[in-house]
Amino acid sequence: MQTLALACDAAGLDCGDAVLMRLGENAVYRLPKVPAVARIARTVDYARDVRAEVGVARWLEEADFPAVRLTGPADQPVTVDGRLVTFWELLPDSDNYGTAGELAKLLRWLHRLEPPSWLELLALDPFRRVEPRIELAAVADDDRRFLLGRLAELRESYAALSFALPVGPVHGDANIGNVIRGSDGRAVLIDLDGFAVGPREWDLVLTGMYFERYGWHTADEYREFSGVYGFDVLAWPGYRVLRDVRELLMVTWLSQNARERPEIAAELARRIEDMHNGGDGRRDWRPF
């Protein structure tokens, strides 16, 4: 809360009655008195990512693409207390998620956009933050060795993939949890911090695996998604490799908060055990 108070003071915004919405790569706070959302990056080591996120937001606004908009000070991010903070519009209902079909429509539109020359996007590196997360995770030593071994296997498998779709700007974390209805009722894309240049399959695989592996989508939802986008990632030969890469990222992302909440620690233990055991038994995994 100290960082939030300092950032709001620097930006001239009221942080009274702030509510923590989510804790992951960013601490995300609702500022009801502004109204706005503040996103606090874990460390200034993420500076390039955060500045790219700000650039992406400005590009998408110029292109009239339906995405969350920056708000507050013109000069962002705000750097205080050794962290970077950005401010975003507060959408009317953060639990009013879009549909799989709306996500597909947004991705199809996004993947056709040409980024401006002034916007510098990094090449997609799926494994960039995985090893540090494993090293810091609150897990047993044998689980840590297992995860590091899995990381080495998947690095090799990913490097050998042949992609069917062209390379270009990707959202990076494209799932219906990142599609929220705006004040006009239309679906908008949020969480722009994962943008990169990479294979478009990266943005399609989450919806595929949420259906195929975890049962978080129905068959009808997945058919709508693949039909609207115009590509069935489940039928692509590299799907299983990309799915397993994404799964490792999901598990190591969750590990960052295992010390904070016992239910997250229990979920992390369940996921690592299932990965140890092999097979496709993932139907009891809880989305976070």
Image: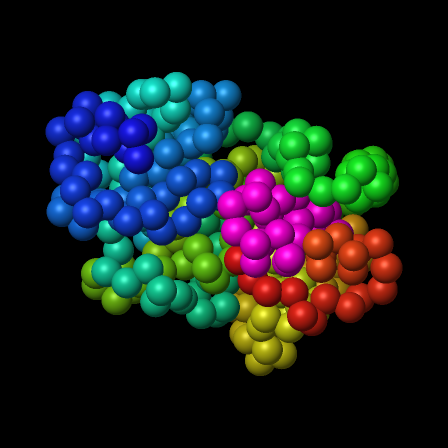
Image position of 162 with respect to 217: above or below: above
Instruction: Determine whether, in the image, residue 272 is placed left or right of residue 175.
Output: right
Q: 26 or 168: which is nearer to us? A: 26
Instruction: Determine whether, in the image, residue 192 is placed left or right of residue 19.
Output: right
Instruction: Determine whether, in the image, residue 226 is placed left or right of residue 171.
Output: right
Residue 224 visible in the picture: yes
Q: Position of residue 286 (x, y in %)?
A: 59, 65
Q: 184 or 253: which is nearer to us? A: 253
Q: Classify residue 225 by image quadrant.
A: bottom right
Q: Classify residue 127 by image quadrant.
A: top right
Q: Position of residue 55 (x, y in %)?
A: 37, 30
Rendered residue at 34%/20% (across/down): 81
Instruction: Determine whether, in the image, residue 178 is placed left or right of residue 67.
Output: right
Rendered residue at 78%/57% (across/down): 273
Image position of 272 with respect to 29: above or below: below
Protein image colouring: rainbow
Q: 26 or 116: which is nearer to us? A: 26
Q: Position of residue 37 (x, y in %)?
A: 27, 44
Q: Position of residue 70 (x, y in %)?
A: 26, 39
| Number of numbered tags placed on the structure image | 0
Residue 159 visible in the picture: no
**Quadrant, the N terminus:** top left
Rendered residue at 64%/73% (across/down): 215
Q: 253 or 124: which is nearer to us? A: 253
Magenta run includes residue 155:
no
In this picture, which residue range is highlighted in magenta? 242-268
